[in-house]
Amino acid sequence: MFDGLKDKLSSFREDVEESTEDEEVPESEDTTADGSEQSASDSAANPTESSTAADAETGPAQAADATSAGDAADASEAGSPDDGGDGSTEPSTFQRAKAFATGRIIIEEEDLEQPLWDLEMALLESDVEMSVAERILETVRETMLGESRKQVETTGELVERALHDALLDVIAVGQFDFEERVAEAEKPLTIVFTGVNGVGKTTTIAKLSEWLEARGYSSVLANGDTYRAGANEQIAEHAERLDRELIAHDQGGDPAAVIYDGVEYAEANDIDVVLGDTAGRLHTSDDLMAQLEKIDRVVDPDMTLFVDEAVAGQDAVNRAKEFNEAAEIDGAVLTKADADSSGGAAISVAYVTGKPILFLGTGQGYDDLTRFDPEALVDSLLGEE
């Protein structure tokens, strides 16, 4: 799942490692106090003479300031100015010298410029929404720029940490414990599903009914999709296979009335959850959006979940945003996640809408519904499973 995006994130790590592996000490750090160069081999051959000469030329006070590698480490730990004296955020020559003396490398803007550009293009090619890609890049840059890493650590580890934080920042927006909310809700809990035609709403309802059953919660299905021919037959087939009760009216009936009847049935029969289907619609379909408003008014559902295909990429992200603006949603379910290589919708939907992805559809079976785990997804994308 999301293999294409995994490859692109791995390429970014390799690019940054390559850009920093030839890091060298600035020339000024190889010069003596009087400006003349002293080779490393000369210093190694005559350490006593070098030390004596340095002390003689610099004087006692300045010689005391010529810190050892350990002293430089202490100074670095204690903190030093973030600029080079001119207000620049670039590491100064002094900072780079201290870093080198203690076996560290400072990540600079020039190290990240091309890799970040490549990462941005890779994210956009993977259908990650523009504002989401920009947020990821900003977080990675802030985490890495000026970072002084120990040489015993790898640059790859530093990149992975930056990517981990950046991805989790956008993916985990709005997350809540769905099962806990079901457990704590006054029964019956009513959940309404919405989205465009053909994205798997009805099948997702059946899958969620099975998911709830496995956790001890009973459910009834209510077919509020009275607009589409064959809708009753489709959901009835799922209800029969799962041995669930189905509440349905004739085609052309009032969707709000159907779901209301579902709630009444649940109350009378001690059913925990009402799962209400609705007609597929575009946010620009005024009549159908008015139906949703009526369902909200008459039924007052506890949750409205938006359903779309992960493989729809940027289209799914745009539709999620539009539906949330037209009729506020509480979360999203992405179907066909197992067939999605890009991962753009999974990365973007929560950040764009401010509402969490709650489930991923990962196959054709009723058991193929996976609770969305942002941390697990990030670990998977970075190969940390």
Image (cartoon, rainbow, N blue to C red):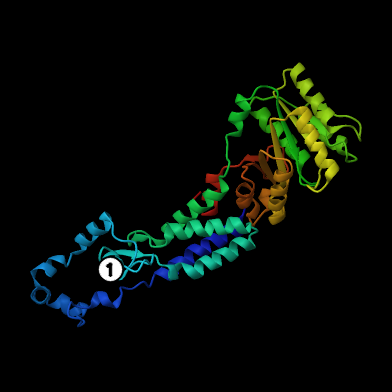
Of the residues shown, which amino acid type is indicated by label 1? Phe
Front residue (pair 215, 262): 262
Residue 60: percent from the left, percent from the top?
Answer: 8, 69
Query: Count the marks: how many?
Result: 1
Q: Mark 1 sits on what residue?
A: 94
Write down the quadrant of residue 127 in the picture: bottom right
Residue 221: percent from the left, percent from the top?
Answer: 78, 29
- Callout 1 environment at 10 Å: few (<14), some (14 to 19), or many (20+)? some
Q: Residue at x 91, y 35 (%)?
A: 252
Residue 308: percent from the left, percent from the top?
Answer: 72, 47
Is residue 105 something one can see in this rendering? yes
Write down the quadrant of residue 78 in the picture: bottom left
Residue 254: percent from the left, percent from the top?
Answer: 87, 32
Is residue 363 something one can see in this rendering? no
**Image-based side of 230 in relation to 329, left or right:** right
On screen, 12 above or below 2? below
Mark 1, secondary structure of its residue: helix
On screen, 116 above or below 294? below
Q: Residue at x 36, y 71 (%)?
A: 23
**Which residue of the protein is positioned furthest toward the front in this rendering?**
86
